[in-house]
Every structure is written in C-alpha cells, then in structure tokens.
Amino acid sequence: MRKTILARYICFFVCLVFLTNCGGSRAVLWHGKNATPATVAAQNAAIRKPGKPKAVVPVYVATSRQSQNDYSEPFGIKRSKTLNYARVDVGIPQKHKKGEVETNGYKPDLENYFSAVNVVKYDGREAFKQQLNNALDKKPKGKREIFLFIHGYNNNFADSTFRAAQFAYDYSLNAVTVHYSWPSGGSIPLYVYDRDSADFARDGLADLLTLLSETDANEITVVAHSMGNYVTMEALRSLALQGKRYPIDRISSFLMAAPDIDVDVFERQLKDVKKMPQPTAVLVSRKDKALAVSGRLVGGHARVGDGSSIPLLQKNGIAVLDLSDVDGGAHNVFASSPTLMALAHDGSLSTSMMKETSETGGQQMIDDSGNILRGTTNLIFYTPARIISAVSQN
C-alpha cells in the first residue's frame, strides 16, 4: 500500500518536471550561485562589453522573502515576517520573443537573456510608497495606473520578477509595474512548502494592497497566476473580515489566470470577501495539464482554473475567458499567448468588455477580433450573467 502511494507521488512529480520545463538552469538576476567577488570582478573586466538591452522595465517589488547576500538572488526562499522593498530594472534582451522569458543560470547577457541592469533596495514602507508616487507622477493625469503581479508555484525571485517585466512589456502596459514576490521554494518537490508559504504570504499581500490604495494611482490592475491566486484571495478575505474594504474597492480590475484553488475553498473565500473587485475575470483551460496534476496531488479536487466550475463563477459575478483552444491552452497561456496580446493591443480585450452584460458587448468582441482570431483559436467569453458568445473561426 505504501509503495503504491509512493509510486503515485513519484509519478506526479515526474509529470510536474515535464510540465514546467524545469530541466535547465533557473533564472538568476546577475551571476550564478557559485559567483564570488573575484569571479565577478574578472567578468566585469573582460574585453567583451555587455551591450544594451532592447528595453528596460522598472519592477517595484514588495516581498515576503528574506533578504540575502547572493549575486543570483537578493531575496531567497526563507520567509520574512516583514515586507522588504526594492526596484529591479529588468533588461529585456535584444533577441526577445513575445511571450517568452529567456533565462539561463549563469551571468545573463543582454542580447539573449533577461537580466537585472540595476537593483535598488528601499528602507521601509513610506520610502517605497514615495517611489511609487514619483513614478506615477510621470504618467499623464487621469492615467496613472499600477499593474500588480502575483506569481504562482515553483518560482524563485528572478523567475517571477522577470515574468512581471515580460508581461508588462509584451502587453505594452503603460503602468507602473509592481510585483509581490512571496516565498515560493522555486523547486518542484517543494509543492507543499509553497502551499504553506501561500498561507504565510497573505498578510504581506494585504499590507501591500493597503499601501497601493494609499498611492496617487487612478487605477490598480491586479493579475495573479496559479497558486498566486490563492495568496490573493486569502489577502482579500483577510481584509474583508477585518472590515478593511477600501483596499479591495480600490482595485480597478482583477484577472485570475489559471487559479490553483480548490473550488470548495474558493466558494468559502467568496462568501467572506462578499464583494469582489469589479470587474473580476478568470482565465480557465481544460487543457491545463499543470492544474490537472495539482488536482490529483490533492485527491482529485477540482481547481478553479480547470474550466469545470464556470456556472459557479458566473453566479458570483465573475466573467470567464475559456482559453482551452487558445494557443494550446497551457498553464502560462495568459502571458505567452500571441492571440491575447493581439486582442489587448487591438482593444477588444478590455475591462469594459468584461463588465459588459448585454449581447451587444459580446457581438462587438466578435466583430472587432474576427480578423485576429481567424484560423487561430476558439475563444469563449462568458459574462457574469450568461454565455454571451463563442468566437469560432475555421
């Protein structure tokens, strides 16, 4: 019996290895884990110059990871009881392909790999808020937006920071990018550690949402991925139970990409939050193999992002985009899909569309995006009330 259970878990973890493509080196900000001051100095003195990135995306980071003296990761997997704050200026490589985060485990070069061109640490909450307001002040009045990204399972600090920058860059977001980096173990066997860290990290995210609500931002857009949705829902639940509605109400839109949350747990979270940010939308896929494995690991319980609970989401005022047949429908399709990027740039995929509850809104989406979707995908959009439309091109 024990051998059967052990074999089952080994099988699941082997599946996770293939699903997450983690056979190669993990991302690093500057230098690999074996770097020393002497080797860094030697590399910096090398004849070949590093060149320039294609673009630089400043990512303002609040993290519940402990700070560490490490060239590859300034914040590690250990949990911090207080938030640490920083800004990472992420260099987008010259050879960047939309939807990808090109990384290696050694010193990245700016031609081929994402890397940090600068890191600044801030001393406390007020200093961080002032830096956000300074960045917002450079945006046009009335268009001062914060984009907050919360990563999922199996991410180290560099992985998730680079993903935030990639999403902001590829979707051409004219916003101040903020990233909440919670203490994921960044390792496939540490799934249980990550689930515990997700519980631990909710208070830090609640504090960050409170801080963001105090800034000069006109809008706050939140995008969470996978297990990061559990962290986010728990933070919203914690704020709601304490009667702190303002940080929740300040969220202009909330996009839940492939949420790795037990459906029963999600129902309880919704009950406690009572009123979700408007609009809230969930990206689901029946072809998300990572969520399928996650469901098996926890006894076969359905996940919110696996597409099995669309009526529940609609009933609770949540819009749904079914991405099962959009560019493969994989776990990271929210950040890698050329179709979604095209729709976002075209204006067809917008918060106003998600709010729409009339047939006109769904039909407008078909009319506006038909050329983009032709021969590419079968995207289904569900409003909170009912199915609006199915966009299908042969």
Image (tube, rainbow, N blue to C red):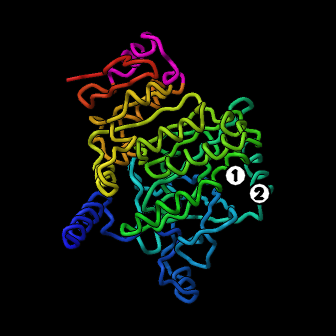
> In the rendered image, which residue does mark 1 sit on?
207
Residue 309 inside the magenta-drawn segment? no
In this rendering, would 249 be left or right of 24? right
Mostly what secondary structure, the magenta segment? Answer: helix
The magenta segment is: 352-371
Identify the residue at horizontal 46%, vertical 44% (top origin): 265
Asked whether residue 56 appears in the rendered view, the answer is yes
Q: Nearer the viewer, mark 2 or mark 1?
A: 1
Direction bottom: furthest residue: 38
Amino acid type, callout 2: Arg
Q: Which mark is residue 247?
A: none
Identify the residue at horizontal 46%, vertical 57% (top origin): 93
Of 286 and 20, which appears nearest the observer?
A: 286
> In the rendered image, which residue does mark 2 sit on?
125
Mark 2 neighbour density, 10 Å: few (under 14) some (14–19) many (20 or more): some
Q: Are marks 2 and 1 in contact (CB under 8 Å)?
A: yes
Quote the CA–CA distance across marks 2 and 1.
10 Å
In this rendering, would 257 be left or right of 269? left
